[in-house]
Image (spheres, rainbow, N blue to C red):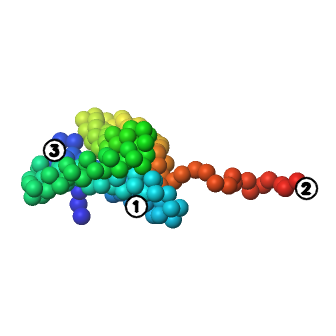
Amino acid sequence: LHLPFHRAYEESTFINAYLMFAIGLGLGHIILGLALGIINSIRERAVKHLVEKVGFLMLLIGSLTIIGASMQKLPEPLATVGILAVFISAVMIIWGGGVVGAIHILTVFGHVASYLRIMALGIAGVVLAVVAWKMQKSVNNIVLGAAIALVIHSLNLVMHTFSSTIHSVRLNVLEFFDKFFEAGGKEYKPFSMKRR
């Protein structure tokens, strides 16, 4: 599989493909988190949490159905089913999660869109690499050209090493863990001593 990264900043079709890929990856990750949340709720017999998680899952699927029908990728009657699913899911989320659940109705779409940061960083890296290549090519002196390329590529490498790591950790801890992880229970104290 050859992805034309060197043309990604010039042709919007490639950027659109990367946008769709990033959104799809974000949706998959969020849906996996909600599925884990549903499993945890069933294990803990937490009915309200279960209803809330199923509501969020229905909200995403209903929204995707509406978008697919409006873009004529799905049959048009499915838009009505999607709208109905969104309304039912909103009621489920508010009943299961209360005020916080109602606020999270809007933030769940922001969580999916957060995955676009990684895609934007990737394209920014491509653009910087192309800039380095064009700058060193435009200089007649090979030593100066190599120095320019080395500086820009080093900056690009450092920026992407830290930025992509920080953003990836943030996506896992905030967007993904939030769907199924709940703190509580027994405090973890591995080095504590029991006093008699």
* Towards the viewer: 124 or 49: 49
Task: Say what secondary structure mark 1 lies in.
Answer: helix
Residue on which disc 3 sits: 11
Residue on which disc 2 sits: 196
Task: Say what secondary structure mark 3 lies in.
Answer: loop
| Contact (Cβ within 8 Å) of mark 2 with mark 3 | no
* Towards the viewer: 152 or 30: 30
Mark 2 or mark 3: name the one nearer the start of the chain: 3
Mark 1 or mark 2: name the one nearer the start of the chain: 1
Quadrant placement of the N terminus:
bottom left
Q: Amino acid at mark 3?
A: Glu
In the drawing, what numbered circle is on residue 35? 1
| Contact (Cβ within 8 Å) of mark 1 with mark 3 | no
Quadrant placement of the C terminus:
bottom right
Mark 1 or mark 3: name the one nearer the start of the chain: 3
Residue at screen point 54% across, 51% down: 182
Task: Indicate the position of residue 178 as horizontal and vertical percent values.
Answer: 47, 49
* Towards the viewer: 63 or 162: 63
| 1 or 3: mark nearer the eye | 1
| Contact (Cβ within 8 Å) of mark 1 with mark 2 | no
Task: Indicate the position of residue 104 as horizontal and vertical percent values.
Answer: 39, 42
Task: Indicate the position of residue 177 as horizontal and vertical percent values.
Answer: 48, 52
C-alpha span from label 1 to label 2: 44 Å
Q: Amino acid at mark 1?
A: Ala
Residue at screen point 46% across, 57% down: 47
Task: Indicate the position of residue 90 as horizontal and vertical percent values.
Answer: 31, 46
Residue at screen point 78% across, 55% down: 191
Mark 1 packing: few (<14 Cα in 10 Å), some, or many (20+)?
A: some
Q: Amino acid at mark 2?
A: Arg
Task: Say what secondary structure mark 2 lies in.
Answer: loop
